[in-house]
Amino acid sequence: MQAISVQQPWAFAIARGGKTVSNQGLPTAYRGPLLVHASMRVDLKACDSPLIQAAGWDPRDPLATIGAVIAVADLAHVCSAGAPGGPCDCGPWSERGAHHYHLANVRALPRPIVALGRPGVWEPKPGLVTEVNAMFAAATAAKATAAANQPS
């Protein structure tokens, strides 16, 4: 498993708002599960973006935090056509001059996990991956228990 750090409110839009493209400075050959880390930097101008507003940006939401892993997604594809400024069909979330990481199967964490991030694609510490997996397992078990206790 790998990770990327993304500024808020863009990280929130990935976790909660259907943002399926992450704009990155470098391409990667990696494909597979990817932790989405909300970096310590906030793009204040983006908070007023119509796309961010449509994604439901709420600074009071726990996933609007900084310095924490807030979601897991599958890195399915990377489009580099836009990196040199060329046209691509990656949608409204894509920016010219960036590599577009296409994210699928985005799963928001039940609560953020504080962690240090870094630029680019990075390898998280094994303990962080274990904590993320345990959190999803506990949430799945709680849902199964709740479903089993529902009257028919």
Image (cartoon, rainbow, N blue to C red):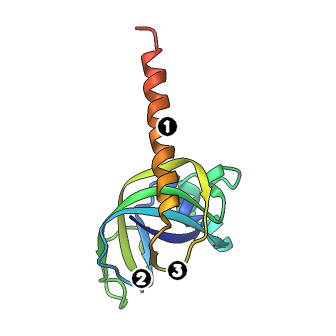
Amino acid marked by disc 3: Pro
The percent position of residue 135, horizontal first and vertical second, equals 51, 45
* Residue wearing tag 3: 119
SS type, badge 3: loop
SS type, badge 2: loop
Question: Going from the N terminus, do you reach mark 1 or mark 2 first?
Answer: 2
The percent position of residue 3, horizontal first and vertical second, equals 46, 68
Distance, label 1 to label 3, CA atoms, is 30 Å
Seen from this angle, which residue lies furthest bottom?
A: 84
Q: Does the rendering let one see residue 14?
A: no
What label sits on residue 139 in the rendered view? Answer: 1
Amino acid marked by disc 2: Ala
Residue at 31 percent across and 73 percent down: it is: 30
Residue 34 lies in quadrant = bottom left
Question: Going from the N terminus, do you reach mark 1 or mark 3 first?
Answer: 3
* Residue wearing tag 2: 98
The percent position of residue 31, horizontal first and vertical second, equals 30, 68
Amino acid marked by disc 1: Ala
Seen from this angle, which residue lies furthest front?
A: 127
Distance, label 2 to label 3, CA atoms, is 14 Å
